[in-house]
Image (tube, rainbow, N blue to C red):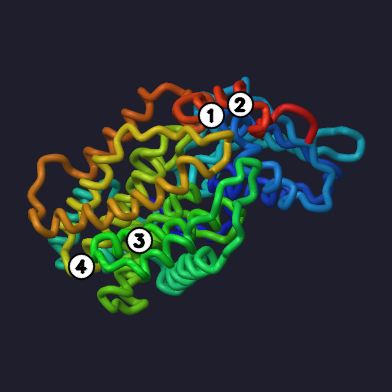
Amino acid sequence: MYSLKELYRSGLGPSSSHTIGPYRAGLIIQKRNPSASRFRVTLLGSIAATGIGHFTDKSLATAFEGKDLEIVWRDDIWPKQHPNGLILEAIDKDGTILEEWHTFSIGGGTLIDLGSDINSGDHCYPHKYLSEIMAYCTEEKISLWEYVDRYEDSDIWEYLESIRQTMMNSIADGLSNTEKYLPSPLKYARRAHIVYKEALLEMNPSIRENGFVSSYALAVSEQNASMGLVVTAPTCGACGVLPAVLRYLQEVYQKTDEDIRKALAVAGILGLLAKHNASISGAEAGCQAEVGVACAMAAGASAFLLGHGINHIENAAEVAMEHHLGMTCDPLGGYVLVPCIERNAVSAVRALQSAYYVRMTGASHLISYDEVLQTMIETGRDMAEAYKETSVGGLAKYYQKKLEENSDIPIVSNKGEC
């Protein structure tokens, strides 16, 4: 597996695969072709189908600022290697193509070239499965965060501190933003600051906990939806789950920033395993691969912060992932709003519940985290394409029906000039 730096990335929302990935690709091809006079980016598959709502065009415009850029939308072409395909071309003043680069944005801002896969190249960690890592940690008598410390570069804790700060700032910025609506034609209301105020007044301790956790997740997700700065954990679409749980547990249990950095390391290993052995791409495997993995990461981090060892951490992550199996990705109108934002809030609460459940029942269970990840990717492969970030099935389909019945509801389309 690669470094945690390949999992946790700070960037502008609302989608790591549809904004951060294309943005990075744009910068890369420009650096490789400084003499190019213009560029053309052809978007394929899911990026073409939902790119307008995911602000892919805005992300590319930012990456190629000041350059002559043409964007071509081809939602009729779905690459076999991965549904998030890009063809980037650098062209000189005479019309000669200097470079044609085929790449794929596979989630979390990661790019892989045509014909390659995520498991090619040099790796940071020598183990591929959590069962192997657990056996190694048991033999060496080290914890999961010490495993990270053993194999990462010496600057990993400085890097994780920057990730922690960005996460906490995203919560603070989201809670303080009192604008009525998020930036989209859907007129989707911001709710984070409202839920937080209600939680402050709530007397029932269970509802109060849910209110605080939900408000923190909503805050980050709303920042993400408005192209704010967030951390891929493991993606932008699922970025609210882990920060919400970390802040809440830090407040309630008076954890230090060092504790949170260690929890990020624990969660990061769980996320890396999903990224390398299954998927963290909604376009490839549905939202189970995004919010489901985020919930597993947060559940494992919660178990760690509650004082448990690697067996409880593994079980909590498995419980969380198991109960997201089959979750579809069907964003209304192509925007990272419905059901994405509320889903982050609900799954943050579920992450805590998973850790609490394992705390009470113990770490003995039948299905391992490795097995549930394998099940997740198999489920994703069996899932109909309409339910994998295309906005043509599920909730998005019924929204489309409302469009046909009510002309006042905005229509989102990728067709036309850019």
Residue named by callout 3: 211
- Residues at circles 1 and 2 in contact by the CB criterion of under 8 Å: yes
Viewer-proximal residue among 20 and 401: 401
Q: Amino acid at mark 4?
A: Leu
- Residue under the point 40% across and 46% down: 343
Q: CA distance from mark 3 to mark 2?
A: 33 Å
Residue 134 can be seen, yes or no: yes
- Residue under the point 18% across and 69% down: 307
Q: Is residue 296 left or right of residue 113?
A: left
Viewer-proximal residue among 100 and 247: 247
Judge whether 105 appears above or below 207 on screen.
Answer: above
User: Can you give x and y, in whole percent of width and height, for residue 409 in the image?
Assistant: 64, 33
Q: CA distance from mark 3 to mark 1?
A: 28 Å
Q: Nearer the viewer, mark 1 or mark 4?
A: 1
Say which label, 3 or 4, has the lower sequence index: 3
Tell me if mark 1 has few (under 14), some (14-19) or many (20+) residues whose alpha carbon lies within 10 angstroms of its own.
some
Viewer-proximal residue among 71 and 50: 50
Q: Quadrant of residue 173?
A: bottom right
Residue named by callout 1: 399
Q: Quadrant of residue 101?
A: top right
- Residues at circles 1 and 4 in contact by the CB criterion of under 8 Å: no
Residue named by callout 4: 306
Q: CA distance from mark 4 to mark 2?
A: 47 Å
Helix, strand or loop at mark 3: helix
Residue named by callout 2: 403
Q: Amino acid at mark 1?
A: Tyr
User: Can you give x and y, in whole percent of width and height, for residue 335 in the image?
Assistant: 57, 40
Q: Is residue 165 left or right of residue 259?
A: right
Residue 264 can be seen, yes or no: no
